[in-house]
Image (cartoon, helix red, strand yellow):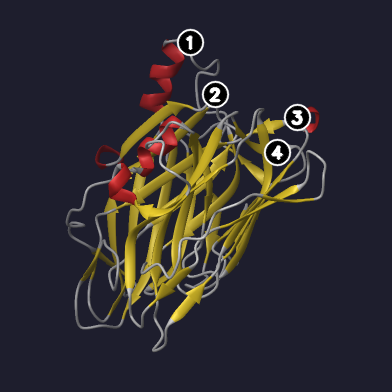
C-alpha cells in the first residue's frame, strides 16, 4: 500500500512553444502557455490550452512537471491526434468553441496529467522504464479551472514540461483510470463520508469473452494515483475489494487543498484477485449550507490513476444526484453507493 501525504481574462495570447532542455531524445521539453491575467475573485472553468508536439515518432513520457503559481485551481491534460477538436492554432481558447470534452479526449488519445487542487508546482514521475505512450502527430490539450482567491490582480506565466525516455528502455506502458462521485450533499456543520463501490467484473468478462484480454479476472497494476476535492475535503481512501467482500487499501491521503494530492504507488498495487474498486471522500462542512457537486464553493470527489492495463477504465456516479440516506458512524454522516449504482466503462488504450 502507498499512503499519499498526498479561470480567465487574457492579458495576451503568447505563442506556445516547445523548448528542449538539451539535444537528446530524452531531453525535457518545456512548453510555456498563456499568459493569464485574473481579476480579484475571478473564476473561469471553460478555458483550454492547446500545444502541438510536432512529434514524427512515438514519445514515451516518464515524467510531467507543471508549474503554475497561484490562480490555477486545477487542470487536466490529455494527448490527442492533431486533427482532434479542430485544426485551429495553438494557444488558449474557450473549450466550448472547439467542443472539447474530457471523456472524448481520453478515448481519442489518452490522459497525460492531472493537477492537484491549487497546487502551484507538481511533478508526476513514474518508475524507470514506465511511461505514457504518445503517438506520432499528437497535441496536448489542458482544460483549466482558474480561480483568483486574492484581493489583487494575478498575472500568470505557467509551463508544462515533458521528460521522455528512449523506446528501447520502456518496460511498461500506462493507461488512465478515472472514477467520480457526483452524488454529493455535504450536510452543514457535520463531518461526512461519501463512498462508491464499482464492480469491474462485468466489463472485464465482456472483454474476456471477446478475446480482448487473456486473463479471466482483472490482473493489472496501479502505479500512480491522485485525489481531487475542494477546500472542504479532508481525505480520500481507495480500496480494492475481492468477490467475498474482503478489501485492501490501494492508497489514502489526508492532505488538503494546496498540497500535492498525487504520488507514486510503490510498490505498484496488483489488482489480481480483486474485482471491485471502492473509493471514499471525507469532508468537514463547517458552513450553514448543504454543499453539492460543482465548482466555486461546491465540492468534488474524483479518483485518478494510471495502470498497466491495456484499457482505460472509468466511471462512478457520473450524473448529479442526491446522495441518499446517511448512516451516522461515530459522528460522521456516511453515504454509500453500491455496485449497482456505479457505472463502469472501458476503452482500448492501445495505439
Within 10 angstroms of label 4, few (less than 14), some, or many (20 or more) residues?
Answer: many
Camera-side mark, 1 or 2: 2
Q: CA distance from mark 2 to mark 4?
A: 15 Å
* Figure check: 46 above or below 71: above
Q: CA distance from mark 1 to mark 2?
A: 15 Å
Please give the name of the residue rendered at 46% of the width and 79% of the height, measured from the top-left corner.
154
Give the x, y percent position of residue 51: 53, 47
Q: Nearer the viewer, residue 305 or 18?
A: 18
Q: Which residue is mark 1?
A: 211
Q: Is disc 4 in contact with disc 3, using a CB cutoff of under 8 Å?
A: no
Please give the name of the residue rendered at 47% of the width and 72% of the height, measured from the top-left corner.
257
Within 10 angstroms of label 2, few (less than 14), some, or many (20 or more) residues?
Answer: some
Q: Which of pointers 1 and 4 lies earlier in the amino acid sequence?
A: 4
Please give the name of the residue rendered at 50% of the width and 66% of the height, measured from the top-left corner.
35
Q: Which of pointers 2 and 4 lies earlier in the amino acid sequence?
A: 4
Q: Secondary structure at mark 4?
A: strand
Q: Which residue is mark 4?
A: 130
Picture quadrant of residue 65 = bottom right
Q: Is disc 3 in contact with disc 2, using a CB cutoff of under 8 Å?
A: no
Q: Which of pointers 1 and 3 lies earlier in the amino acid sequence?
A: 3
Give the x, y percent position of residue 169: 80, 32
Please, which residue is most extreme toward the bottom here?
Answer: 151
Q: Which residue is mark 2?
A: 350
Q: Which of pointers 4 and 3 lies earlier in the amino acid sequence?
A: 4
Camera-side mark, 4 or 3: 3
Q: Secondary structure at mark 2?
A: loop
Q: Which residue is mark 3?
A: 167
Q: CA distance from mark 3 to mark 2?
A: 16 Å
Camera-side mark, 1 or 3: 3
Judged left or right of residue 245, residue 300 is left
Give the x, y percent position of residue 173: 64, 32
Q: Which of pointers 3 and 2 lies earlier in the amino acid sequence?
A: 3
Amino acid at each position: 500500500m502507498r499512503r499519499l501525504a498526498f479561470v480567465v481574462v487574457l492579458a495576451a495570447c503568447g505563442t506556445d512553444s516547445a523548448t528542449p532542455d538539451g539535444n537528446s531524445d530524452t531531453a525535457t521539453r518545456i512548453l510555456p502557455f498563456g499568459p493569464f491575467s485574473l481579476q480579484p475573485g475571478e473564476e473561469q472553468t471553460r478555458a483550454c490550452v492547446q500545444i502541438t508536439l510536432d512529434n514524427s515518432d512515438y514519445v514515451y513520457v516518464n515524467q510531467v512537471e507543471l508549474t503554475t503559481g497561484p490562480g490555477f485551481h486545477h487542470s487536466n491534460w490529455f494527448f490527442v491526434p492533431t486533427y482532434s477538436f479542430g485544426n485551429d492554432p495553438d494557444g488558449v481558447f474557450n473549450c466550448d468553441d472547439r467542443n472539447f470534452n474530457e471523456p472524448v479526449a481520453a478515448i481519442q488519445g489518452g490522459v497525460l496529467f492531472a493537477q492537484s487542487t491549487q497546487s502551484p508546482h507538481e511533478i508526476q514521475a513514474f518508475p524507470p522504464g514506465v511511461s505514457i505512450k504518445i503517438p506520432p502527430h499528437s497535441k496536448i490539450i489542458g482544460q483549466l479551472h482558474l480561480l483568483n482567491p486574492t484581493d489583487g490582480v494575478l498575472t500568470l506565466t505557467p509551463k508544462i514540461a515533458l521528460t521522455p525516455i528512449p523506446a528501447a528502455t520502456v518496460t511498461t506502458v500506462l493507461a488512465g483510470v478515472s472514477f467520480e462521485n457526483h452524488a454529493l450533499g455535504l450536510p452543514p456543520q457535520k463531518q461526512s463520508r461519501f463512498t462508491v463501490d464499482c464492480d469491474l467484473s462485468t466489463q472485464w468478462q465482456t472483454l474476456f469473452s471477446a478475446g480482448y484480454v487473456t486473463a479471466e479476472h482483472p490482473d493489472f497494476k496501479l502505479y500512480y494515483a491522485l485525489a481531487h476535492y475542494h477546500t472542504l475535503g479532508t481525505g480520500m481512501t481507495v480500496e480494492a475489494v475481492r468477490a467475498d467482500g474482503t478489501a485492501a487499501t490501494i492508497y489514502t491521503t489526508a492532505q488538503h487543498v494546496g498540497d500535492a494530492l498525487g504520488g507514486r504507488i510503490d510498490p505498484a498495487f496488483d489488482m489480481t484477485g480483486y474485482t471491485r474498486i471502492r473509493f471514499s471522500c471525507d469532508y468537514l462542512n463547517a458552513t450553514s449550507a448543504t454543499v453539492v457537486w460543482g465548482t466555486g464553493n461546491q465540492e468534488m470527489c474524483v479518483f485518478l490513476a494510471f495502470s498497466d492495463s491495456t484499457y482505460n477504465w472509468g466511471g462512478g456516479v457520473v450524473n448529479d444526484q442526491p446522495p441518499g440516506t446517511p448512516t451516522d458512524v461515530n459522528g460522521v454522516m456516511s453515504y454509500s453507493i453500491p455496485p449497482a449504482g456505479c457505472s463502469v466503462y472501458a476503452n482500448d488504450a492501445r495505439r
